[in-house]
Amino acid sequence: MSNFKGTKGKWQFVRYEKTFAIETFGITNWTILQTITNQPQDEENAKLIACAPEMLEMLEHFVNNNMLSITGEEMAQQLIKKATE
């Protein structure tokens, strides 16, 4: 994730009593996001967000190794730019 300027480390989905969070553990422990509404979709949103750094890394891998069609690569590059700038 060469261009990623966000919180480094593996993001993890964490379930608390009434809320959900995305946290990273490692050199520093950091809460990246925590829900406050306890709505039905909060858990699913938190799980998706927790996977974002890994999805970005995989997308960069596909682009860097020419594993996408030209159209797919253009779309991937736009998403990478959107996520990192």
Image (cartoon, rainbow, N blue to C red):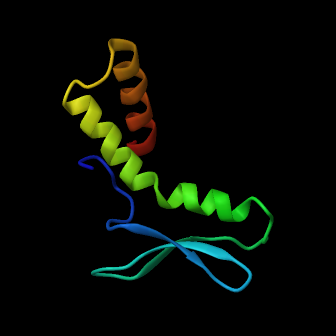
Query: Along the line of sight, which residue is nearer the eye, 34 or 15?
Result: 15
Q: Say if 57 sits above or below 15 in the image.
A: above
Query: Along the line of sight, which residue is nearer the eye, 20 or 85?
Result: 20
Q: Position of residue 38 (x, y in %)?
A: 78, 71
49 displayed left or right of 24: right
Determine the residue positioned at 29% across, 38% down. Answer: 60
45 displayed left or right of 53: right
Determine the residue positioned at 32% across, 65% down. Answer: 8
13 displayed left or right of 30: right
Determine the residue positioned at 57% across, 61% down. Answer: 47
Q: Position of residue 84 (x, y in %)?
A: 38, 44
Q: Position of residue 28 (x, y in %)?
A: 33, 82
> Is the C terminus in the top left, top right, bottom left or bottom right quadrant?
top left
Residue at the bottom extreme of this rendering: 17
Q: Position of residue 4 (x, y in %)?
A: 33, 51
Q: Say if 76 sits above or below 8 in the image.
A: above
Locate residue 66: give its quadrant.
top left
Locate residue 58: give its quadrant.
top left
Residue at the left extreme of this rendering: 65
Query: Along the line of sight, which residue is nearer the eye, 57 or 3?
Result: 57
25 displayed left or right of 41: left
Locate residue 30: give its quadrant.
bottom left
Residue at the top extreme of this rendering: 70
Query: Along the line of sight, which residue is nearer the eye, 53 or 47?
Result: 47
Q: How many marks?
A: 0
